[in-house]
Amino acid sequence: MMKSALVRPVRIVCAVVILFWFQLFAGKTGHVVADLFNYDGIDPYDVFAANCVHHLVMFAVSLLVIILLTKSFALKVHFGLGNKDLGKKFVLIFTLICVVMAVGSHIFMKLNNNLPKYEFPLKANPIIGTIVFQLLFTGPAEELMYRMLPIGILALAIESKQDSSKTFTSEVLLAAFLFACAHMKWTFSPFNIQFDLFAIAYAFAMGVVQGVAYHTCKSIAYPMLMHSISNVLMVTTGYVFVALST
């Protein structure tokens, strides 16, 4: 009886550990592949091209694993448009909140003389390149790796029925935890962890919101849009405030 009671929590812990190492491996692999190329012709300031390749690798690796697991273990994933009306509401409300947050946070930074500092000039090439990267690459790649895949795997480990009437499910919260861990800097020789507490809390909150959108709308499309929109708004607002302050 005791052994059977321990099976489920052990299975969940193993799933979390495996997902953590997989996400770390996929991220490192993306960097290795990105470093194979020279981007001087299209990205002389080295601010977006390598990131695009890195995220393409993450997307491809995640998609491959998802396809394999759906065939082998009946992994439940949602590629369609799901609940369109609810999805549109999520994206609209989320976007309005992000606009307020982006503008408000930069006003606060402006008042405290703490606006972002860029290691590249605010010219057309790096500005357009970074915005395109945030819009087209971050949402699709990161939502496959940090939302669809872990929520599907954790639902299997937890034996969740994935009832969309439940908002904050265990698999959504655990996936958000892993997403927050991805925003830490890890080294293993020597072992060291570096992180910004606000960035971790922000990543976890975003992970929960986007996870809830995926879980309740039954579609990865809306979290992808939300993810990309929030990044574009934050980056673009920074550019505007810095440009107006110079």
Image: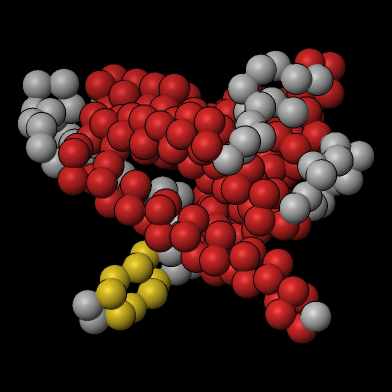
Q: Nearer the viewer, residue 104 or 131?
A: 131
Q: Nearer the viewer, residue 157 or 48?
A: 157
Is any atom of residue 59 visible in this view? Answer: no
Q: Position of residue 87 (x, y in %)?
A: 77, 23
Q: Position of residue 50 (x, y in %)?
A: 23, 35
The residue drawn where x is 67% and y is 49% is 156
Q: Quadrant of residue 30?
A: top left
The residue drawn where x is 33% and y is 78% is 192
Tag count? 0
Is any atom of residue 221 visible in this view? Answer: yes
Position of the N terminus by quadrant: bottom right
Position of the C terminus by quadrant: top left
The residue drawn where x is 31% and y is 24% is 129
Q: Residue most toward the right? A: 165
Q: Position of residue 112 (x, y in %)?
A: 53, 59
Q: Quadrant of residue 194?
A: bottom left
Q: Quadrant of residue 180?
A: bottom right
Q: Position of residue 122 (x, y in %)?
A: 30, 31
Does residue 181 sit above or below 50 in this rendering?
Answer: below
The residue drawn where x is 42% and y is 52% is 23
> Is residue 54 shown left or right of residue 169?
left
> Is residue 115 shown left or right of residue 14?
left
Does residue 155 sit above or below 66 in this rendering?
Answer: below
Does residue 140 sit above or below 109 in this rendering?
Answer: above
Q: Nearer the viewer, residue 151 or 208?
A: 151
> Is residue 17 shown left or right of residue 92?
left
Q: How is the image coloured?
A: secondary structure
